[in-house]
Image: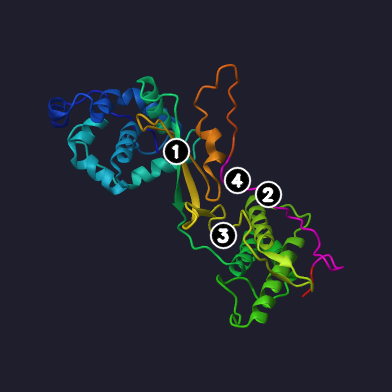
Amino acid sequence: MTLGLAERQGRLGNVAVARCEAELPERSIYRLLHRERERLFPDELFSDLYVQHGRRSIPPSILAVVMVLQRLEGCSDREAVDRFAYDLRWRYAAGVDDEMPGFVHTVLVELRARLRASADPDRIFRVTTELARRVGLVGVRRVLDSAPLFDAVATCDTVTLVRGGIRGLLRALPVELAAAVRAALLRDDDYQQPGKPVCDWEDAAAREELVDALFRDGYRALYALRGVPLGPDAAKAAELLATVIGQDIEEAADGRFVIAEGVAPDRVLSLVDPQARHGHKTSAHGFDGDKGHIAADPDSEIITAAEVGPANGGDAAMAAALLADLPAPSGQDAAPAAEHDHHARPAAEHDPEPVAGTDAPAPTA
């Protein structure tokens, strides 16, 4: 898809322009976007998102205005394209005439996906905050706040996590290597069907035997990959398996592996979204997912920075990134903005230590 360019010379007799120019307040956001759209969001700002062949896209300068108004007015994607189609103020702000056809809501989804995959995903946010600074709406004070970002996937118990981790690793490996790893496993399970294994869940001894067997199969799977070069997907699956078999299980005095008491501080709780964590907004109410953090000017209430962090992290952990735009105190050097990924986790060891109490390189049943 090639870059679409907005019409720079409006049509005479444009109903949207004539009516909005006559009736909108002078300080209206619609007037501001109409006047400054080409300077704030020129189509060329988004040229890196498109290729040199294919059909023309909807001009991204128009979509950027729609996305800004969408956030200001709290609209969904479907509501936003409806506003653009039927609200003259939105058309006036976007600089289009009343005869331009609308577009489907998936166009906004696609642009966000292109932005997310680009080297500059925050360009629309950056441009709008820079404008707020230039016109004096942002001072040197900030307030920080956070809110839960609830996870859409179901959290898993220990048995489901460990078995799912083994299954995920087998699926990520090449066929020949997966067969070699599967041959090292001793449980009567092909690890092909999702869900919990068959067990008498009312019998405590049966549950403990299952946990021990699953841990040992997980260890055998990792041990079978010692020294084997892995591709990115397989390496990630091995890391995830190493994490889930180590976070909830401990060795008992008799050499069996049992579920540990308590909860690991950075516990992985979902195989679908390994970055999700247990969080607490208050001491009485918990949630699973991530946590969104913002910094805002307390007078204008304009958001100046936004970050996503783990649900079990506090506001202080994000303070440096959220306050990076503020000048350093007099006589001090500004702290460099560290490159970071708030979802990153320390790499788990793919080559685990031998299980205590066994002479063999891998545990036995």
The numbered dot on residue 269 is 3
Q: Secondary structure at mark 2?
A: loop
Mark 2, other Cα within 10 Å: few <14 / some 14–19 / many ≥20? few
Could you tell me which quadrant the C terminus lies in?
Answer: bottom right
Q: Are marks 3 and 2 in contact (CB under 8 Å)?
A: no
Q: Are marks 1 and 3 in contact (CB under 8 Å)?
A: no
Could you tell me which quadrant the N terminus lies in?
Answer: top left
Q: CA distance from mark 3 to mark 2?
A: 17 Å
Q: Which residues, given as a range, are shown in magenta? A: 341-362
Q: Are marks 4 and 1 in contact (CB under 8 Å)?
A: no
Q: CA distance from mark 2 to mark 4?
A: 9 Å
The numbered dot on residue 115 is 1
Q: CA distance from mark 1 to mark 3?
A: 29 Å
The numbered dot on residue 344 is 4
Query: Which is more toward the observer, 312 or 358?
Result: 312
Q: Is residue 173 above or below residue 84?
A: below
- Can residue 158 be seen by looking at this rendering? yes
